[in-house]
Every structure is written in structure tokens, then in C-alpha cells.
Amino acid sequence: MSLTLNINQSHNPPRLSAREIETLYLIAHEFKNKEIARILYLSTCTVDTHRKNLLNKLGVNNSAGLISRAYQYGYLPMETPENIIANIDDLNIIRLSASSMAS
């Protein structure tokens, strides 16, 4: 007996809001909730809510399942959403300067 996950391809993927798609993109690129909140100009509570909604809509229990299911439904890979490109660049500069200070 083999255990495999099977998504019936005849089912349409769930509809995600623009903010959920942005959050999904950032989760897939390993950003933490606090970083996502900073990039999207949201509170961390709102990011938590988006993450919970994504888990619920995609029918999974954790981030690994979320990414896997997002690929299965065709949400990933995706282009960087236009409105967060500059914010990600700013945060990556902060990340790089913090890591160079640690060395």
C-alpha cells in the first residue's frame, strides 16, 4: 500500500486574494512573518491571518505543505508581485548588512 497525495486536477484551485498571493510569494522565498509584515506594510497579526487563510484554503497544515500544494495548483513559481519588488530589495540590503556585521 502506497501513500501518496493526489489532488484531483478537475477541481479548480481556490481563489486567493491579492494579499494572500503576495504573502504566499514571500513565504515561498523564506521570509519570516515579521519581514513579510514590513514588506507589505501590514501588522504581523494580519500576516498571521493571511498565512492561516492560505493553509485553510489550500487544505494543508504547515508551510512545507503550503508550498507543495501551491506548486500543485500552479500558484508557484510566480513572478515577483510588482508592488513589493522595491520593498524586498530594501529588506535584502538590511539582511546583507546585518549578516556582514556578524562576521
Image (cartoon, grey):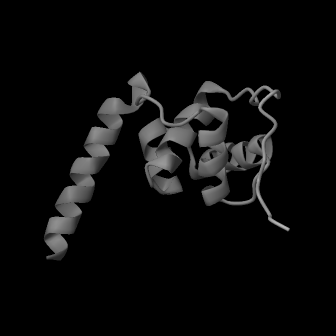
The answer to whether one can see residue 57 in this image is: yes
In this rendering, is residue 85 above or below 54? above
Q: Residue at x 43, y 49 (%)?
A: 29
Please provide percent x and percent y for residue 70: 63, 41
| Residue at (14, 67) in percent of width and height | 100
Q: Is residue 60 left or right of residue 32?
A: right
Answer above or below: position of 102 versus 26: below
Nearer to the camera, 41 or 63: 63
* Position above or below: 52 against 1: above
Q: Furthest-right residue in view?
A: 1
Q: Is residue 42 visible?
A: no
Q: Most extreme residue toward the front, as rendered?
A: 1
Q: Report the quarter where the N terminus lies.
A: bottom right
Residue drawn at 57 percent across, 51 percent down: 44
Image coords of residue 17 (percent x, y): 67, 27
- For the residue pair 15 and 38, the one nearer the viewer reads as 15
Figure quadrant of residue 71: top right
Left or right, residue 97 beside residue 81: left
Instruction: State the image coordinates of residue 72 (x, y, percent, origin top left).
Output: 65, 40
Count of numbered circles on the image: 0
Q: Residue furthest bottom?
A: 103
Task: Assign the C terminus to one quadrant of the image.
Answer: bottom left
